[in-house]
Amino acid sequence: MANYGATTLAPPASATKERDHFKIFLKILYALSLAIYIYFLIDGLNYYRTTYQERPHHESYRELRPAGFRGHGFGILGSTMMLFMLFYSVRKRTRLFGDWGALSRWLDIHIYFGIMGPLFIILHTSFKVQGLVAVSFWSMVAVASSGILGRYLYLQIPRNRRGDELSLRQITELEENFSRDLQETLNLNEEKLHRLDEILKNRGGREPKALKLFLEMALSDLLRPFQVYRLKRLLAGELQLQEPYLHRAVQLAWRKIKLQRRTLALNQVQRLFHYWHVFHKPFAIIMYIIMLVHVGVAVWLGYAWVF
């Protein structure tokens, strides 16, 4: 059986365990980071809600203003996270760090920095931006917001465990593996296997129109529990399956349906992903240029933190 990642039926136990450990690590990292962020947000909420004109008279002004001890620290932390995001591009486009984990994990960390970095930058600005920095700030917001869409489109393209895109030949081979596993698991004859393939093809849908593609994918993901339930009832009725075979059949069949849908939409998703890059990159470049100018001017004017 080919080794094609998240859509693979039976990955090695060690690989599965390793992925599970990384997911747990990522959840803990997000939980701790968000808990710390919420603490600082609530702690300074009274100051952040104060009008811009009255802030110099607030008791926390020297601590929470952008040049204050905590406010400046938020800026350094957020900027550092934004710079760390660039390591993903280096890993993706060069051979550097090639042996340091799968590309998909680098993307997960890239997204983590892309979420937490802007959040701490918001605390650094104390929710007030103006002048040239406002351009960088809103570019950052555009980059972070579009990054969520980019991640979703990325997941719609069939990939292997390392995050590399599968070729059409590999996708076809993987789909054949699903059919073979279904036949072996359920001990189906050729007639029942053909009937099952027809059912799954109908459930897989038709090639979507470009304007409806994104909404159809999002709606399908939102309605997944209901679709899986309907698939379970359909397989139980058509093939007269019972547990524990029914549960395994639904798992395999749903993965095959998902692969069929993504294959049908592959060209359009790739086109959307290209347009996303066209939108995402200019804002990222503007954000980094103005951020570097802002940091350079601050250092030149003597706004050093505790260094």
Image (cartoon, rainbow, N blue to C red):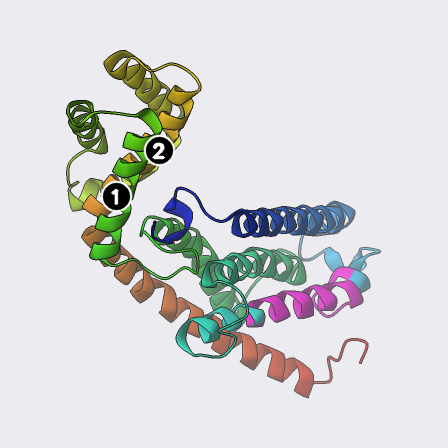
Residue at 41%, 52% (x, y): give it. 5
User: Which residue lies under the disc numbered 2?
Assistant: 252
Q: In the rendering, at what x and y percent does residue 272 appear?
A: 26, 55
Q: Is residue 115 magenta?
A: no
Q: Which mark is residue 5?
A: none
Say if 253 sits above or below 278 in the image: above
Give 122 or 281, whichever is nearer the viewer: 281
Residue drawn at the location 40% of the way across and 75% of the way down: 93
Helix, strand or loop at label 2? It is helix
**Does the magenta stretch mainly form a helix, a strand or a loop?**
helix
Total marks drawn? 2
State which quarter of the image contains the C terminus: bottom right
Write down the residue under mark 1: 175
Q: Is residue 170 visible?
A: yes
Which residues lie in the magenta part? 64-83
Q: Is residue 39 left or right of residue 251?
A: right
Residue at 71 percent of width and 46 percent of height: 35
Residue 65 position within the rendered picture, expressed as x and y whole percent measured from the top left: 73, 63
Can you say whether 230 is above or below 91 in the image?
above
Where residue 40 sits: x, y (%)?
A: 75, 51
Amino acid at the residue labelled 2: Leu
| Mark 1, other Cα within 10 Å: few <14 / some 14–19 / many ≥20 | some
Comes first in the chain, label 1 or label 2:
1
